[in-house]
Amino acid sequence: MTIATDARGAPATGRVWDRLKNFLVYGANSNPGEPRIPFYRHTLVVRLTHWLNAGVLTIMLMSGLQIFNATPALYWGKQSDFAHPLVSFVAYQNADGDIVKGETRFGSWRFDTTGVLGASRVDGEMRARAFPDWATLPGPQWLAMGRVWHFFFAWLFVINGVLFALYAFTAGHIRALVPTGRDLRNLPHEIVEHAKLHFPKGEAAKHYNPLQKLTYFTVIFILGPLVALTGLTMSPTLDAAFPFLPWVFGGRQSARTIHFICAFSFLGFFIIHLIMVFLSGTWNNVRSMITGRYRIDATPSGGARA
Amino acid sequence: MLKSDRRNLLRGLTLGTAGVALSGCKSLSQTQWVQDVLYSAEGLTRRVQRLFAGSHALATEYTRADIAPVFRTNGSINPPTQAYQRHVSEGFKNWRILVNGLVEHPLSLSIADLRKLPSRTQITRHDCVEGWSCIGQWTGAQLKLVLAMAKPKQNVRYVVFYCADPMEDLDGDGVPDSAFYYESHDLLEATHPQTLLAYELNGGPLPVANGAPVRLRAERQLGYKQAKYIQRIELVESYAHIAGGRGGYWEDQGYNWYGGI
């Protein structure tokens, strides 16, 4: 890749600012002065469901951690084998009864996580709590209210998801999200290109690339239903109505564990998603998710694309 | 009603964004209208769950091999009142369960009376609101038989259970002495075939820590709905006049009345 020299002979600080601005708007592999094509990228339904989902999932995660704190351990099976959790968060206290240490346990592995996991400060005082107050909703230990937040926004999560799915299947948007055989064959190449921060340009930038398709499809159509179903499996009334639910997931406690893994998969997706938005042009991406309008670098990139 | 539901939904959407910014702060959760909006989903959840579970869907029953070696205890594990301790020392032979309120025939049942009724034994999973589960075998009389004996009046909607365990320490001596536990169920859950006045756990007399001499089993509900140490069962049209007015001790502390999820 050639780096454009500044023909105007502007001072170095000006060139740095131009390049930084270009990075923040168009991303890591876009040059200042590149001719760009306007492109209507996201429909109104996609934009609305996207932002609604962002808010709803944040609240679901934080209120979920509040609920988790009431039993800071995960188990496998129909019931809780209290002596053998898969994961647990433990607080230690000294002879005076003060909480002094927080520990995270994976099976027989133990990690000192004082201050963040197992024990952390609430209003300056060390408390026994799996996740710290800045990560939970409400902040202080308040299971009843955490549940109320969670079960209100769970409805919005499901309604939003169903609306998106209906739209995707009726408006043909689903075709943009399902990876094709060719996409899957291109995956290794695509991963290398992403690692080099070579993002699609030209015509190729008008479609989701194979990695995007695979990620979005998995998150929306696998992780989404899975988190909802494992959540519902924790309901004793729904287990009576649909006994196959706990059976499918290996028991209520297994469902709770899978629910937790799903939640952290969403968090993992969210972090990678933000990094990719940042690297591939923060403002261009954010604008396209607000107004729908995106700008594509006109010069096609080197690599072959689907 | 529809209009207010829609307004609540819109407010909820606004909350979504506000909640993120203010999560570390508890003020949002303490704001009345925020609570009103959030609690408004409870009725929807109850109706939809009931639509699927109806009045007869049975909770899964497990095998003897699934029974937990020790049934987990939670909440009150030994009511400290003199009256209760006297019953313990007497082996609960003078314990009475009153059934009154909106009934034609008020009852006063001893544990022996309860044991004379046809019994049901079920191995079920207990799901605590805190998230854990524990499997145990319960034996008791179906609540619907007891209610039928009392002949409920037409306007009965709820069954309220009054318990012997105090939850709060009023005189500050470190021993709970007031705010006795209570719970309520609607008739649909109260007359469910698996809803028992249970007097045995895992084939032995119900231990004190698990609610001796008699506790409720409502297998499609969370643990806090399953009152222990039951002394009185009152049939009512509304629970609004009882204690905090929200249908149970924990409900008065903010927990949902509908404990199916």
Image (cartoon, coloured by chain):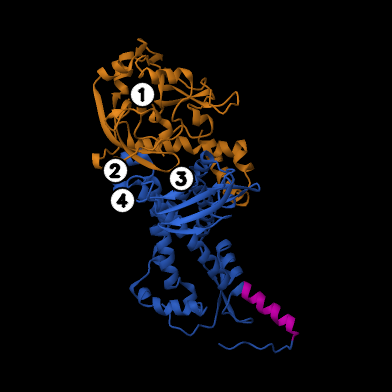
Disc 3 is attached to a residue of which chain? A
Q: Which residue is mark 4?
A: A250
**Quadrant (top left/top right/bottom left/bottom right) for the C terminus of chain A:** bottom left
Q: Which residue is mark 3?
A: A71
Residue A270 to residue A197: above or below: above
At x 44% / y 76%, what residue is drawn?
A191
Which callout, 3 or 2, points at the residue further toward the start of the chain?
3
**Residue in front for this viewpoint, B250 or A49:** B250
State which mark lies toward you, 3 or 2. 3
Q: Amino acid at mark 3?
A: Thr
Q: Which residues are magenta?
A: A10-24
Disc 3 to disc 4, how far (Cα)? 19 Å
Disc 2 to disc 4, how far (Cα)? 11 Å
Is label 4 in a helix, a strand or a loop? loop
State which mark lies toward you, 2 or 4. 4
**Quadrant (top left/top right/bottom left/bottom right) for the N terminus of chain A:** bottom right
Q: Residues within 10 Å of mark 4 (few under 14, many from 20)?
A: some
Q: Quadrant of residue A12?
A: bottom right
Chain (orange)? B
Q: Amino acid at mark 4?
A: Gly
* x then y, percent, for residue B128: 41, 39
Chain (blue)? A
Q: Which residue is mark 1?
A: B214
* Main secondary structure of the magenta stretch: helix
Mark 3 vs mark 2: tell me if same chain. yes
Q: Is residue A114 left or right of residue B87?
A: right
Do the residues bearing badges 1 and 4 touch, measured as CB atoms within 8 Å?
no
Q: Is residue B89 left or right of residue A283?
A: left
